[in-house]
Amino acid sequence: MTLIMDSRSVLIVDDDPVHRTIVFHMLRAAGYSPESVEDGVDALEALKWKDYLVIILDLMMDVVGGDRLLDHLEQTRPGLMNRIIVLTGIPNARERLAGRPVFDVLEKPFKQQTLLEAVARCAEANQGGGG
């Protein structure tokens, strides 16, 4: 199966509809092609069909949370780990995720410019594909 790869594609995985919408519009205004889902189950389904350049992941979600999604991807698609920017309200999340090969960890609340810079760095680092 060949996955579709859009050079500006970003998958937003967050169960908070307000936060998901804000990040979606921020990214679209910056010229990216964002898509959003509300949990890890929907993220896994989306990843079956499309190869996203950047994945923005919230850790605390109902159904399948970010930690479980990270576990699954690390086992089944380790090449995607360096495309993940964790965006979370969990204190000390960077230390908690120190052993994970994610691209970056940003704590909420975040500045728009900080997120856009992280997405740009991640996109640039992953332009070659893989996963």
Image (cartoon, rainbow, N blue to C red):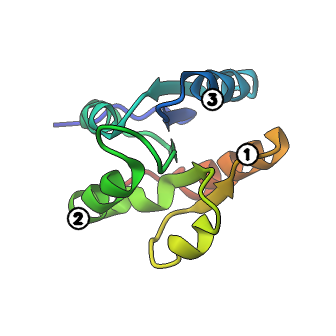
SS of the residue under disc 1 = helix
Callout 1, which amino acid? Leu
Q: Of label 2 and label 1, which has the lower sequence position?
A: 2
Q: Nearer the viewer, residue 98 or 65?
A: 65
In front: mark 3 or mark 2? Answer: 3
Q: For the residues marked 2 and 1, what is the alpha-carbon distance in whole angstroms? A: 27 Å
Looking at the image, do the residues carrying marks 2 and 1 touch, with CB atoms under 8 Å apart?
Answer: no
Callout 3, which amino acid? His
Q: Nearer the viewer, residue 73 or 106?
A: 106
Q: Position of residue 127 (x, y in %)?
A: 54, 50
SS of the residue under disc 3 = helix
Residue plotted at (51% across, 45% down):
58
Residue under circle 1?
Answer: 115
Query: Is 71 above or below relative to 54?
Result: below
* Residues packed near mark 3 inside 10 Å, few (<14), some (14 to 19) or many (20 plus): few
Residue plotted at (21% across, 59% down):
76
Q: Point out the image quarter for the N terminus.
A: top left
Q: Of label 3 and label 1, which has the lower sequence position?
A: 3
Q: Position of residue 78 (x, y in %)?
A: 32, 63
Residue under circle 2?
Answer: 75
* Residues packed near mark 2 inside 10 Å, few (<14), some (14 to 19) or many (20 plus): few
Q: What mark, if any, has residue 36 been given in the picture?
A: none
Looking at the image, do the residues carrying marks 3 and 2 touch, with CB atoms under 8 Å apart?
Answer: no
Q: Of label 3 and label 2, which has the lower sequence position?
A: 3
Query: Is 47 above or below relative to 69?
Result: above
Q: For the residues marked 3 and 2, what is the alpha-carbon distance in whole angstroms? A: 28 Å
Residue under circle 3?
Answer: 19
Task: Let me know if residue 131 appears in the view.
Answer: no
In front: mark 3 or mark 1? Answer: 3
